[in-house]
């Protein structure tokens, strides 16, 4: 097939690079321009009067596959002067949080005022290692706090490939039982964010999905900016560094 003047083969539509890092920058800038405050998960947890806090976006960043990608998100947040909560896995095949460069990035997050939380996989660990999930959680929190020299205030359950739902760990347990202020989907009065907000996530890679008060809004593909423009009081925004790129999906992350 002969290429046309634009360099694209005839009959092949040009892709729309929605999830570039500049797209993310513009999303967050628009939210700020609309008068929203951007908070970490723990900052929201500590608000004394959540109902009268004004327009708020709680920004959560789940680092599933790459801390090098997370460095790109850090740059955006630094430019805009806003914080986020980064949830970090300890046992990922894809990255070692304590490698030379990755640990440097984690320390940079803390120095720049971001919250670092634990991306929990305790049921996966318990199944694979034939261990007790509570022991796994306590051990991992101790490791994180010792390495980072900060108190880990929150956890968020990661969805892995074992078929287990790590969120089930919390069915009969509370974050406070383990010295935590919150879990990302808990119903405790001090947090209860997922169940009392407009939740929007980029977890489907090429499109957004939304929930209102814990219920999926079927077919609602509006972005963070679009929900903010509609005047939502409280937005719980989940992003993944792996979703974003500079030029195209398959570029080398380094």
Image (cartoon, rainbow, N blue to C red):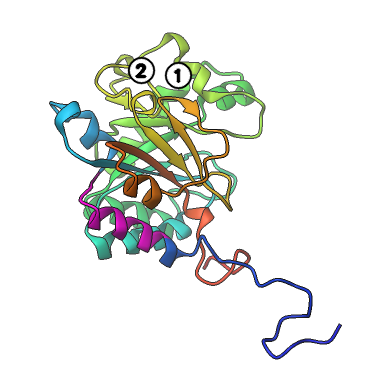
Magenta segment boundaries in residue numbering:
24-38
Q: Position of residue 72 (x, y in %)?
A: 41, 63
174 or 36, nearer to the observer: 36
Residue lying at 56% horizontally and 18% vertically, measured from the top left: 131
Which residue is labeled 2 in the image? Answer: 187
Furthest toward the right, the residue is: 1
Q: Quadrant of the N terminus?
A: bottom right
* 112 magenta-colored: no
Distance of label 2 from label 1 (alpha carbons): 23 Å
Residue lying at 45% horizontally and 19% vertically, measured from the top left: 135
Furthest toward the bottom, the residue is: 5
Q: Is residue 250 above or below residue 183?
A: below
Q: Position of residue 53 (x, y in %)?
A: 16, 34
Residue lying at 38% horizontally and 45% vertically, measured from the top left: 227
Q: Provide the major secondary structure of the magenta segment.
A: helix
Which residue is labeled 1 in the image? Answer: 135
* 33 magenta-colored: yes
Q: Label 2, secondary structure: give it.
A: loop
Furthest toward the front, the residue is: 230
- Label count reads 2
Q: Label 1, secondary structure: give it.
A: helix
Q: Position of residue 182 (x, y in %)?
A: 31, 25
Does residue 100 appear in the picture of this structure? no
- Tell which circle, 2 or 1, labels the residue nearer the N-terminal end: 1
**Left or right position of 78 against 170:** left
């Amino acid at each position: 097939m002969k290429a046309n003047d634009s360099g694209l083969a005839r009959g092949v539509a040009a892709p729309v690079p929605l999830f570039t890092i500049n797209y993310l920058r513009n999303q967050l800038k628009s939210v700020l321009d609309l008068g929203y405050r951007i908070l970490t998960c723990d900052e929201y947890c500590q608000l004394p009067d959540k109902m009268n806090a004004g327009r708020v976006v709680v920004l959560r960043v789940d680092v599933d596959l790459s801390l090098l990608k997370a460095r790109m998100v850090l740059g955006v947040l630094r430019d805009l002067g806003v914080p986020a909560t980064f949830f970090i896995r300890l046992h990922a095949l894809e990255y070692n949080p304590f490698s030379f460069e990755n640990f440097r990035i984690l320390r940079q997050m803390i120095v720049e005022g971001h919250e670092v939380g634990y991306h929990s996989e305790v049921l996966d660990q318990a199944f694979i290692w034939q261990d007790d999930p509570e022991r796994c959680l306590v051990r991992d929190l101790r490791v994180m706090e010792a390495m980072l020299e900060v108190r880990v205030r929150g956890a968020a359950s990661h969805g892995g490939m074992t078929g287990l739902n790590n969120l089930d760990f919390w069915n009969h347990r509370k974050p406070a039982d383990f010295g935590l202020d919150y879990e990302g989907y808990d119903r405790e009065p001090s947090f209860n964010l997922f169940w009392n907000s407009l939740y929007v996530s980029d977890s489907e890679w090429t499109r957004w999905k939304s929930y209102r008060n814990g219920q999926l809004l079927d077919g609602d593909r509006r972005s963070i900016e679009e929900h903010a423009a509609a005047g939502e009081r409280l937005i719980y925004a989940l992003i993944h560094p792996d979703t974003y790129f500079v030029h195209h999906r398959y570029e080398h992350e380094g």
